[in-house]
Image (cartoon, grey):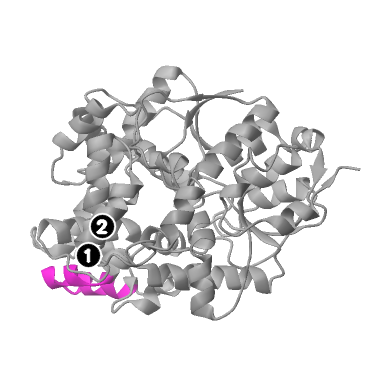
Amino acid sequence: MKYAYYPGCSAHSTARDMHESSLAVARALGIEIEEIKGWSCCGATAAHQTDRTLAASLAAANLLLAKEMGLDMVVNCAACYNRTKIANHEVLSSSAIRAQVRDAIGHDYDGSVAVRHFVEVLLEDVGLDRLRQSFKRSLNGLKVACYYGCFLVRPHEVTRFDDPEDPTSLDRLVMAMGGESLDWPYKVECCGGGLNLTRTDVVVKLAGSIIDMAQASGADCIAVACPMCQTSLDLRQKDIEREAGKRYDLPILYITQLLGLCLGISPKELGLNRLMVRPSTILKAIEPVA
Amino acid sequence: MTVKIKKQTPENSLIHVVEKMSDVDLSRCYQCQKCTSGCPVAKLTQSPPSEIVRRLQLGAGDELLGSDIIWMCLSCETCYARCPMEINIASVMDALRSLALEKGVSKTKGNIPLFNRIFLRMVRSFGRSYDLPLIAAYKLGTLNIMPDIDKFPTMLRKGKMALLPPSGADKPVVKRIFGRRQPNKGTGK
């Protein structure tokens, strides 16, 4: 099991904890991960909002590097995953875009690299059985609201990730860890992440309704797989509480942080100290597997 | 008897340009409004997605490019996921944004075009995003320094904001990509 790893820009800023916990989990499970040398920004929201070819070319440059490594590309950031898969799709479905990308990068890229989210690798390549055998601790009935957001599941024809309206990938991981995955209605609602700095009012409103619903559903924490979702729900939680006039204090963890805890990895190695809402209730709930 | 109706859309009309740029056929929309029902910002905008499509169908011109939803749209793609006619409205929004920028019609609350411009400038210079100067430049550009200022010390302490610029990207390739930008002519489908 070896993959070309694309960390994405947030791995060195707002989502260092996502990056750290994924690497730690991969190490614990014997998944070989080789960072793509020379990777650059996938273009993110700014590129596709500006220019279709620019967006496809920026993401394709990384795909070309992964192709040279001869490995599947594994991505943690759901936004990078989405943009990179869209670039693949664009190159494959349009010879005009493929030609524009070739002109921009200076090399032809044929759309042949498989782009996988780390969660897909865990479920499909490692498998729940092996994961269960590797767990040293249990979530011990912890109530987890699994939140998928937009980028993993939409557009479905491109990402092909799980079910677009009712995904269960994260839920299956939570159940394997001995947690209780909640049935709640806001799994694939949008948190407003793209407007985090520019229209914070919109983010506070959208992310606020997600947190409110998770808590009303009885969640002890929310599990995410996207740094934009994590930022909207965690970093903005104080703003949301101020607006709502109530206290939520709901920890927002990356699924890889929960997995890491169950694999017996130290909280520090998983970047849990970087979370804005302290996960002390979660740490207390986790117990060694009987 | 077969009646042939020829779709008459002038080559330079907004709907024609948008359809070409985004590979969609907007004549397929029958206004079921599922897009608007699922749109997270529909209630916050002046003109929700189904209305944008209808206005295009009715021959709207460049005045449409000033609609606030163009920049409030989060590209969450819920509209596209639920459209019974599989119209990629998210891609229509991308085309409208590109046109709004091209024609200089991008005045919007929150100044998203400014943010995007600075973001892309960072990528062009460093090959990757560099949050600290990005946020600083955006704040200066909007003349609104105070929001979130209280979060910076915590973010720095928790390592959620890098002080040093990113390194390691293949910068010449990124520079080349930016240097060869061309106007979006669609896929030619």
Quadrant assignment, res A250: bottom right
Residue A42, horizontal then vertical, whole percent: 35, 39
Q: Residue at x 22, y 64 (%)?
A: B142
Which quadrant holds the C terminus of chain A?
A: top right
Query: Disc 1 marks which residue?
Result: B142
Observer-nearest residue: B28 or A224? A224
Observer-nearest residue: A93 or A220? A220
* Residue A134 is at least partly visible in this image: yes
Q: Amino acid at mark 1?
A: Thr
Residue B107 has which mark?
Answer: none
Residue lying at the far right of the rendered structure: A290
Observer-nearest residue: B81 or A36? A36
Q: Amino acid at mark 2?
A: Tyr
Label 1 with label 2: CB-CB less than 8 Å: yes
- Please state the chain letter of the residue tagged with numbered disc 2 in the rendered image: B
Residue B138 has which mark?
Answer: 2
* Residue B61 is at least partly visible in this image: no
Residue A95, horizontal then vertical, whole percent: 26, 34
Q: Residue at x 34, y 64 (%)?
A: B73
Mark 2, secondary structure of its residue: helix
* Magenta residues, start to end: B50-68
Main secondary structure of the magenta stretch: helix
Which quadrant holds the N terminus of chain A?
A: top right
Q: Above or below — where is A2 with respect to B17?
A: above
Answer left or right for A286 relative to A101. right
